[in-house]
Image (tube, helix red, strand yellow):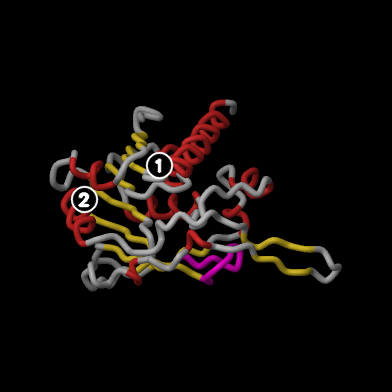
Amino acid sequence: MNLTDKLILTNEDNMALMARYPDKYFDLAIVDPPYGIGADSQKESYSQGKNGEGRRHRKLWEHKGWDENIPTAEYWEQLFRVSKNQIVWGGNYMTEFLKPSKCWLIWDKMQQFTGSDFEMAWTSFDKASKAFRMSRIEAYSNNNKTEKDAGIKIHPTQKPVALYKWLLDKYTKQGDKILDTHLGSGSIAIACHDYGFELTACELDKEYFDKGIERVRNHISQQKLF
């Protein structure tokens, strides 16, 4: 599906997608594959405030089984074949397939998100490690305020648009072709659209894909109003 002239988003297996492209076609792959830690089985989490009001920290997600294992050796072979450089979220769970790197990235959640205090990404870059600390202003920018006020979260491992914009700022140049093999909530598609990057991405789960496409379309539509 060509959502725009620069966003090619499909509902398919990532191995089928990568098989269509020649060696080193993509300048950068930014991927958030399964960590193998059962994130798709997340249960509801509540706490009680000082005034007795309840606060939900995490919602209940349907168990779909996609986070039972990390990607196979065949996946990594194809990913490294079709892309020149890679950023892999959760790379600390996948070191059996990833070479040692001095450039690790840290997403410091600043206690604004549930789960771990931070997440790590492996990269293929020969650069210094960096950390992204998203301020409350950034958390509520880029149309995130509307989504957060409405409680919109369409994927259990959804990452903020601001995080992907930081990656694009730091590790790309204009004209680069971006690949994402696990589209999920579509945050990367919003970031690439806003910055004018060409993105090719796929999502295997039809429910996640449909909700992600709707989210990206709504974002594009809102931009056209202003």
- First reached walking from the N terminus: tag 1 or tag 2: 2
Q: Quadrant of residue 45?
A: bottom right
Is 216 in the magenta? no
User: Residue 55 at what x, y percent from top left?
Assistant: 73, 62
Q: Is residue 89 left or right of residue 150?
A: left
- What residue does disc 2 label? 83
Q: Position of residue 33 (x, y in %)?
A: 36, 57
> What's the residue at 54%, 26% (across, down)?
224
Against 108, is 17 above or below? above
Mark 2: few, some, or many residues within 10 Å (few <14, many ≥20)? many
Amino acid found under the numbered disc labelled 1: Cys
Helix, strand or loop under label 2: strand
Identify whether 187 is placed above or below 106.
above
For the stretch drawn in magenta, the main secondary structure is loop
Image position of 167 (left or right of 139): left
Distance between mark 1 and mark 2 Cα atoms? 17 Å
- Residue carrying label 1: 192
Which residue is painted at 19% across and 52% down in the image? 78
Q: How many marks?
A: 2
**What's drawn in magenta, residue-wise?**
107-117
Residue 225 position, x and y percent, is 59, 26
Q: Look at the image and tell me in which quarter the N terminus lies.
A: top left
In front: 180, or 131? 180
Residue 108 lies in the magenta-colored region: yes
Q: Find numbered disc 1 in the image and state the secondary structure of the residue it sits on.
A: helix
Q: In this image, 107 relative to 101: left or right?
A: right
